[in-house]
Image (cartoon, grey):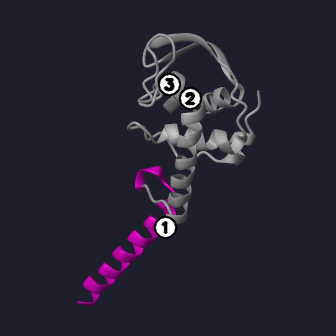
Amino acid sequence: MIKKSLIAVVSIASCVVLFLNCKNDKDLSVVSSDDAQNLKTSIARGKAVYNDFCVSCHLPNGMGVKRTYPPLAGSDYLQNKQEESIKGIKFGMKGEITVNGQTYNNVMAPMGLADDEVADVMNYINHSWGNDFGEMVTEAEVSKIKK
């Protein structure tokens, strides 16, 4: 009886230690309620930025215009090149990029957004139209990206 109780206590303790050591692991999707609220607020602000600056080219559904403006919805470029995407929003971009197997060679003018606005619009596009591209982008993260 004591042996079974000891095994149960050790098992529970091991699970608690494992959970505490892994709670920041992306696979566990553990997000504090403050972090979740901050992301939700950022996404809402980002939607307003998107509607002001991005919607005319990338469209309300994030699908872009084939061979002219790349899609943001389901974009492998956006998913795999977060820093380059942030840099493009912050400073504009020109030259060839490949998105979902399609080559785009156009110019995106700099929008003149502040770092917090860039972070917010990244959070919006990273979590819209079925996208789930990473953790929350912060103003501090955006401020570190240089031309």
Given the image, on which type of amino acid does mark 3 rest? His
Say what secondary structure mark 2 lies in.
Answer: loop
Q: Quarter of the image holding residue 10?
A: bottom left
Residue 8 disc label: none
Local crowd at mark 3 within 10 Å, few (<14), some, or many (≥20)? Answer: many
Q: Quarter of the image holding residue 110?
A: top right
Residue 58 disc label: 3
Given the image, on which type of amino acid does mark 1 rest? Leu
Residue 10 is a magenta residue = yes
Asked whether 138 or 45 is in front, the reply is 45
User: Which residue is denoted by mark 2 in the rendering?
Assistant: 54
**Residue for point 47% across, 50% down:** 26
Residue 73 is a magenta residue = no
**Residue for point 40% across, 36% down:** 129
Separation of marks 3 and 2 at Cα, in angstroms: 6 Å
Earlier-in-chain disc, 3 versus 1 = 1
Residue 20 disc label: 1
Say what secondary structure mark 1 lies in.
Answer: helix
Disc number lying in front (1 or 2): 2
Q: Are marks 3 and 1 in contact (CB under 8 Å)?
A: no
Which residues are the magenta region? 1-28
Say what secondary structure mark 3 lies in.
Answer: helix
**Prevailing SS of the magenta stretch:** helix
Q: Are marks 1 and 2 in contact (CB under 8 Å)?
A: no
Separation of marks 3 and 1 at Cα, in angstroms: 41 Å
Q: Quarter of the image holding residue 116?
A: top right
Q: Are marks 3 and 2 in contact (CB under 8 Å)?
A: yes
Given the image, on which type of amino acid does mark 2 rest? Cys
Quadrant location of the N terminus? bottom left
Asked whether 7 or 134 is in front, the reply is 134
Q: How many marks are shown on the rendered structure?
A: 3
